[in-house]
Each structure stands twice: as structure tokens, then as C-alpha cells.
Amino acid sequence: MDKSLSWGPPRPLIVICWAAVVALVVWVIFREDPAERVLVSIAALALAGYAAFGTFLRPRLAADRTGVRVRSLSGVRSWDWRQVRVELVISKRLGRDLAMLEIEEHGDPDQLDEHDPAIFVLGWLDLGADPREVAEALEELHAEA
């Protein structure tokens, strides 16, 4: 049986975002202050953008023994394990360690597809899981390949 794993934005967070969008739209409908309506509308649009991103770009990252797939606004990119480098990058932000998963396309430039070489940096909000755990799972899948 082929082991396949996928990660995407946390579903509960996406549901909360959509509920907040509905609440903000209701707020805008029943308020009369124009400045307040504009500001709340901007917040609702920003939140709707994130919620739509999380809803329609699922799964954000998928992998199996054959390779890796990353879904973005420009479409789905797929590579086999020889074509990508997966690295866990830890940096300090505001005194905290911030883990990000970096997926970089590499290889012979003549062998790349019609797209430019790509690098994807995915964090907790993109994956719905700790990037450290995702990196470990990807290492296991790569070892099985």
C-alpha cells in the first residue's frame, strides 16, 4: 500500500475565519457610520481572502513515495524526490524560534519543466502542523522512495 500524506491550513481556523467574515458582513449591514463600515469591510475582505486561500488550496503540501506536490495560487507543482531539496529552517523572530519548511526545486536546468525553478516556504498556518513534524514525515517518505 502506498503511503501518502498531506497537509493544509487547519480546518477549524478556516471555519472560524468564514464565521468571522459572516459576522463582519452583518456588522457592516447594521452600522450607519461610513468610516466604521469601510474599515470593517476591509477587515472582512482580508479575512475572506485568507479563508478562501485556506479553503481552495487544500492540501497545501502532499507527498508520497514518488515525490512532493505543492499547491499554490499558480497551480499544483509536482516533483519526484530527486528534483527537490526539503529543509527545515529555524530562525529567531521576536525572541522565539520560528520553524519553516523550505522546499526548493533543483536539478539540471534543461530538465526543469516550463516553470521557473521554485522555492516554497511553508509555516504552521500553511501546513496545519508543526513544520518540524512535517519535515520528519517527509524524511521518512523520502527514505522509503
Image (cartoon, helix red, strand yellow):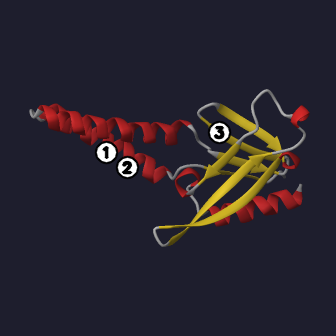
Q: Is residue 8 above or below residue 110?
A: below
Amino acid carrying label 2: it is: Ile
The answer to the question of whether label 2 and label 1 lie on touching residues, with beta carbons closer than 8 A, is yes
Whether 81 is drawn above or below 35: the answer is below
Residue 16's label in the rendered image is 2
Q: Identity of the amino acid at label 1?
A: Ala
Count of residue discs: 3
User: The disc labelled 3 sits on which kind of residue?
Assistant: Arg
Residue 145 place in picture, x, y as percent? 89, 54
Q: Left or right: where does residue 33 sit relative to residue 48?
A: left
Q: CA distance from mark 3 to mark 1?
A: 25 Å
- Image point (75%, 30%), residue name: 115
Mark 3 or 1, nearer chain start: 1
Q: Is residue 84 left or right of residue 89?
A: right
Residue 130, how many percent across, how many down?
Answer: 59, 64
Which is more N-terminal, label 2 or label 3? 2
Instruction: Check disc 2: other Cα within 10 Å, few if <14, some if 14-19, many if 20+.
Output: few
Is disc 2 placed on a helix, strand or loop? helix
Q: Which residue is mark 3?
A: 71
At label 1, counting other C-alpha atoms closer than 10 Å, the crowd grade (few under 14, some 14-19, many 20 or more) is some
Query: Outermost residue toward the top?
Result: 114
Q: Which residue is mark 1?
A: 20
Residue nearest the viewer, comparing 43 with 19: 43
Question: Residue 37 appears in which quarter of the rendering?
Answer: top left
